[in-house]
Image: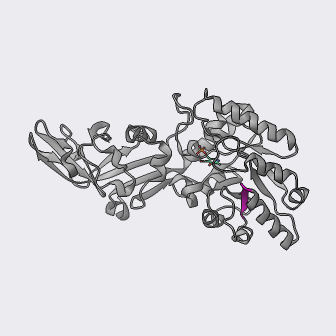
């Protein structure tokens, strides 16, 4: 084992080849639309500096980050021909930073449009951007009145050539949800007034709503990283992440003995307990207390007791002693337990499990370029 891995409480393995394969599947599913990649939040916790180049090697040319700083950090890792779009636009007063780092804003408000327009005038050249319209999520994008004000001012169209008209779906993982059709109708209404502008609506789940939702550019994130895109359906994506925690020590406890903070678990008979070096400070959510399951050579080892900051305790009764000694590793995410399954037990979503993955883990990458 590599010495750095031997130091760590857990080893996180990210399969870049699986991300590339997922990208190919999504691109195929997206038909005629180009396939972008959402690599915000450090590529959903997996490392944008590694994931970005792997996707660029697969032919991806459009990347979405949330924050200006994420775009600045990503720029050196991508070919100059790749576009990096900043979903939140530029915070007021930072517009020049986007230009300096070769980033393109998604403009979400009239205020952002006015600031970008002012910069275009100062620089005396057009500054292209994406325009996001709100189609019912009330989170990001131009509300109807602000979109009308944008369209009513021809100077904006001249100084800011629209690269895409964009919106975002609120309920796309539920294919039968009426919100999907409602948002599509609102998006089409804007699009009819701007037929010359390319359009982008679908995230991962939106791609699977079919061709009506795909337009010119799709923007998957979670599905690239192996998260299931359609609620209640089989997951067509390859798993990307494996997490192996290391056992610190094991002990035998007797009937009536307790485990962990708040003594939320008490043994009803003799049990073998192992302590693993992963806790809520590593993103192993406290809601997994007495709920999660680790696997040792495919055998389940239920989590017992409360998740601590730096450790969890698992019941390894019946598992061979040499597999539960100090230094041995146990599967927390992997072939027997997907990030989605972990999320379900934690009362969360796969997105949160990935983006919370701890910075203390030793990270190993498979494949890539
Ligand atoms: C505007 C926008 N586009 C695309 C995505 C990617 O979504 P997903 O990870 O569900 O594919 C997100 C993620 O939240 C987003 O906010």
Judge by depth and name the residue closer to the eye, 75 or 299.
75
| Residue under the point 27% across and 41% down | 290
Above or below: residue 149 compared with residue 49? above
Q: Is residue 260 visible?
A: no
Residue 163: horizontal and vertical position, in percent? 80, 52
Above or below: residue 82 compared with residue 324? below
- Residue 285 highlighted magenta (yes or no): no
- Of all residues, the one furthest to the front in this rendering is 145
139 horizontally vs 104: left or right: left
| Residue under the point 21% across and 39% down | 319
Residue 303: horizontal and vertical position, in percent? 27, 42
Instruction: Look at the image and give the residue range highlighted in magenta.
Output: 103-109
99 horizontally vs 221: left or right: right
Q: Quadrant of the N terminus?
A: bottom left
| Residue under the point 69% across and 30% down | 181
Residue 367: horizontal and vertical position, in percent? 54, 52
349 horizontally vs 229: left or right: left
| Residue under the point 44% across and 42% down | 348
Q: Quadrant of the C terminus?
A: bottom right
How many labels sit on residues? 0
- Of all residues, the one furthest to the top in this rendering is 176
Q: Is residue 27 visible?
A: yes
Above or below: residue 170 compared with residue 75? above
Judge by depth and name the residue closer to the eye, 187 or 148.
148
């Amino acid at each position: 084992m590599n010495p750095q891995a031997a130091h760590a409480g857990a080893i996180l393995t990210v399969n870049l080849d699986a991300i590339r394969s997922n990208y190919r599947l999504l691109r195929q599913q997206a038909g005629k639309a180009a396939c972008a990649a959402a690599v915000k939040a450090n590529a959903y916790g997996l490392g944008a500096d590694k994931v970005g180049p792997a996707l660029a090697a697969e032919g991806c040319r459009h990347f979405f980050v949330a924050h200006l700083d994420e775009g600045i950090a990503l720029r050196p890792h991508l070919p100059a021909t790749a576009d990096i779009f900043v979903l939140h636009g530029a915070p007021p007063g930072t517009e020049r930073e986007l230009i300096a780092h070769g980033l393109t804003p998604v403009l979400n408000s009239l205020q952002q449009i006015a600031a970008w327009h002012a910069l275009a005038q100062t620089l005396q050249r057009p500054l292209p951007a994406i325009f996001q319209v709100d189609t019912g999520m009330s989170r990001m994008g131009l509300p109807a009145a602000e979109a009308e004000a944008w369209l009513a001012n021809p100077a904006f169209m001249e100084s800011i050539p629209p690269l895409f008209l964009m919106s975002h779906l609120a309920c796309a993982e539920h294919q039968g949800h009426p919100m999907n059709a409602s948002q599509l109708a609102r998006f089409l209404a804007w699009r009819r007034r701007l037929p010359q502008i390319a359009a982008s609506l679908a995230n991962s789940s939106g791609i699977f709503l079919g061709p009506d939702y795909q337009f010119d550019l799709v923007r998957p994130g979670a599905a690239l990283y192996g998260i299931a895109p359609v609620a209640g359906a089989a997951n067509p994506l390859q798993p990307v992440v494996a997490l192996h925690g290391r056992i610190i020590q094991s002990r035998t406890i007797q009937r009536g003995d307790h485990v962990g903070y708040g003594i939320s678990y008490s043994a009803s008979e003799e049990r073998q307990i192992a302590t693993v070096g992963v806790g809520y400070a590593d993103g192993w959510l406290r809601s997994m207390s007495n709920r999660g399951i680790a696997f040792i050579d495919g055998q389940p080892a239920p989590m017992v007791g409360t998740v601590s900051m730096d450790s969890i305790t698992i019941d390894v009764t019946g598992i061979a002693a040499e597999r539960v000694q100090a230094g041995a590793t146990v599967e927390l995410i992997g072939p027997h337990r997907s990030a989605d399954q972990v999320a379900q037990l934690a009362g969360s979503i796969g997105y949160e499990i990935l983006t919370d993955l701890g910075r203390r883990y030793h990270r190993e990458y498979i494949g890539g370029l």
